[in-house]
Image: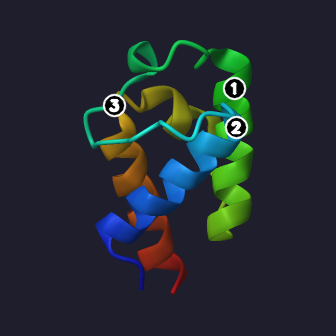
Amino acid sequence: MLTEAQILDALTEIFRQVFDDDSIVLTRNTTANDIAEWDSMNHVTLTVAAESRFGIKFKTAEMEELKNVGEFVDLIGSKLNSKG
């Protein structure tokens, strides 16, 4: 089972790849407003990359409700817990 910190670390790697920016440091409070290129297309790319990395699937409504990275971490954690 992954810890919250491990999920956040993995998401940081995903964000750095998607945005081609190794300086990105995510916190639970990071939002789309904090990353200049985080638009709807990159949101889809992030979603697909996270699904692939963690072996889970998200519903569109779940992704639309997320307000920050912390909620994304929590959603991934809950899906991993229910899967395992």
Q: Quadrant of residue 75?
A: bottom left
Question: Which x, y percent locates residue 70?
Answer: 31, 44
Please, what is the three-letter code of the amino acid marked with disc 3? Thr
Mark 1 and mark 2 in contact (Cβ < 8 Å)? Answer: yes
Disc nearer the start of the sequence (2/1): 2
In this picture, is 4 found above or below 84? above
In this picture, is 33 found above or below 22? above
Q: Residue furthest left?
A: 29
Instruction: Determine whether, in the image, residue 73 is placed left or right of residue 19.
Output: left
- On the image, numbered disc 1 is attached to which residue? 42
Disc nearer the start of the sequence (3/2): 2
The crowding category of the residue bearing disc 2, from other C-alpha atoms within 10 Å (few below 14, some 14 to 19, many at least 20), is some
Q: Which mark is residue 58?
A: none
- On the image, numbered disc 3 is attached to which residue? 30
Mark 2 and mark 3 in contact (Cβ < 8 Å)? Answer: no
Question: Which x, y percent locates residue 18?
Answer: 70, 37
The crowding category of the residue bearing disc 1, from other C-alpha atoms within 10 Å (few below 14, some 14 to 19, many at least 20), is some
In this picture, is 84 found above or below 72? below
